Amino acid sequence: MLESESISRKQIRNGALLNPYFAFSFIWLFLLIVHLFNFNTKFPPATVELTVFALFISFMSFVIGIFYQIHIKEKEDGLAVDDRPTTKLMILSIFIFIAAVIHGRSVPIISVLRGNTEAYQNFGITTLTPIGYCCSVTVIVISAVKFFYGEKNKWKNLLNIAIGFITFILVYSRGLIILSGLIVVIIGASKYRFSLKSIIFLLVLLIIGMLGFNAFGNIRHGYSWNNSNYLLQVAGFNEDYLFLKNFSWTIVYVDTPFGNLAYNMQNEFTDYNFMGLVSQLLPDMVSKRILPEYVGGIQLAVPSLTVSSMFAGGYCYFGVIGMYIQYFEMIFVTFIVTRLSKCNRLTFIAVSASMTALLFLSFFVNTIIYSGFFMPVIFMLVYGYFSLRKPHGNVLVSNVEIKA
């Protein structure tokens, strides 16, 4: 028998959190609403085309999410998976990290603390180090599923999660820390029903986090922790909302991608180029090699506010039509990977949580073609495939019900 109770016997209490389409629908509707408040006067109002687009993708994603939710709530036969730690993959990722340190003769976080803030950008061994990062994300996510849904080996799986995050801290990879952290939170939250107390607790944590983010932003630019004058001036923060200045960094960061898109659509900064559009539909590790001349950048309303969104490249090279094409590509890719993950209950939870996080972060970057974020999902699918082929003695098969 397996060492522990089947993960597939567990009920997922918050199945909606494992629904990528709901996450995408929410974030883009939320961005539109935030922009309508005109917090940042440097950004123009949303054009009619942009407003219609945001409403369309939010509505369509919500409808698709409902059908997806109905589908995953059906009872299915699932292969039982034990919760033993993913040791071999973790050892591989550690070995690759050590090899990169020896090769570069430095640890990025130490170099950054010593003042070399660009050291982490050139760290690693071509091809090998990105594979190591993908292994680390995969281990963190798989271990999180085993930690929250398994019965045994809690500390061993928690140790794997900790080692993965420590690795990302050492290589100063803020993006992978945020991505992995968000996925772990989604996996953990999917197991529990939210009570009023837990919702209030999460809101308090969110407020504290926003205040801390604001303080660190001010300090980084040489101001006192509660002096947001730098950002207020750069973003042209609306004086009607100065009572929210202690949350200004979060507000500006959230509104900037949508604001830059609105700025480009208002001024029609579009260079219609079919090959440019193709470059924005291919994985970046492919497009950088076969179409290196197309970077998909957009014009910035404020030079220091550089964040765009997943639709920046599509608009740059094919206008609003390019944005719709990117959206339907995202829907198609999400359907394919979630469908492939259904062969293994553990992999399904891991991939669904990962895609939810990726689509939620789509307002910052095109997470579908950004290999650094999307490739770990492929690794998880491969892990699930080999888990099915690996003999575990008497394998249990049981029905699973995922609750909304």
Image (tube, rainbow, N blue to C red):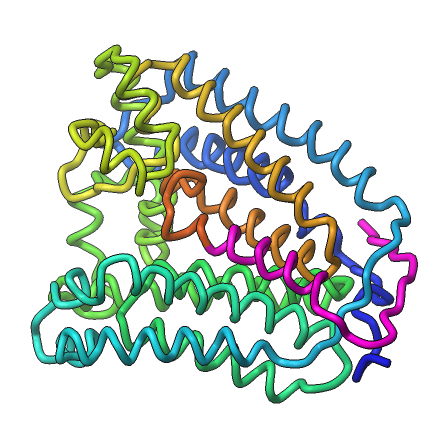
Q: Is 83 left, or right, of 134 in this rendering?
A: right
Q: Is residue 378 above or below residue 46?
A: below
Q: Is residue 309 above or below residue 205?
A: above
Give residue 173's position: percent from left, percent from top.
Answer: 30, 65
Q: Is 358 left, or right, of 210 in this rendering?
A: right
Give residue 138's position: percent from left, percent from top.
Answer: 51, 64
Q: How many marks?
A: 0
Q: Is 353 left, or right, of 268 in this rendering?
A: right
Name the residue at 62% across, 80% down: 85
Give residue 382's position: percent from left, percent from top.
Answer: 57, 56
Residue placed most toward the observer, 307 or 251: 307
- Assess whether residue 385 is covered by the magenta stretch: yes
Residue 74 sits in which quadrant? top right
Range shown magenta: 376-404
- Assess whether residue 293 is covered by the magenta stretch: no
Residue placed most toward the observer, 18 or 382: 382
Residue 104 sits in which quadrant? bottom left
Q: Residue furthest left?
A: 115
Q: Can residue 297 be seen by looking at this rendering?
A: no
Name the residue at 46% across, 19% down: 325
| Quadrant placement of the N terminus | bottom right
Q: Can residue 329 be seen by looking at this rendering?
A: yes
Q: Is residue 22 above or below residue 160?
A: above
Name the residue at 88% across, 50% down: 76
Give residue 355's position: percent from left, percent from top.
Answer: 56, 47
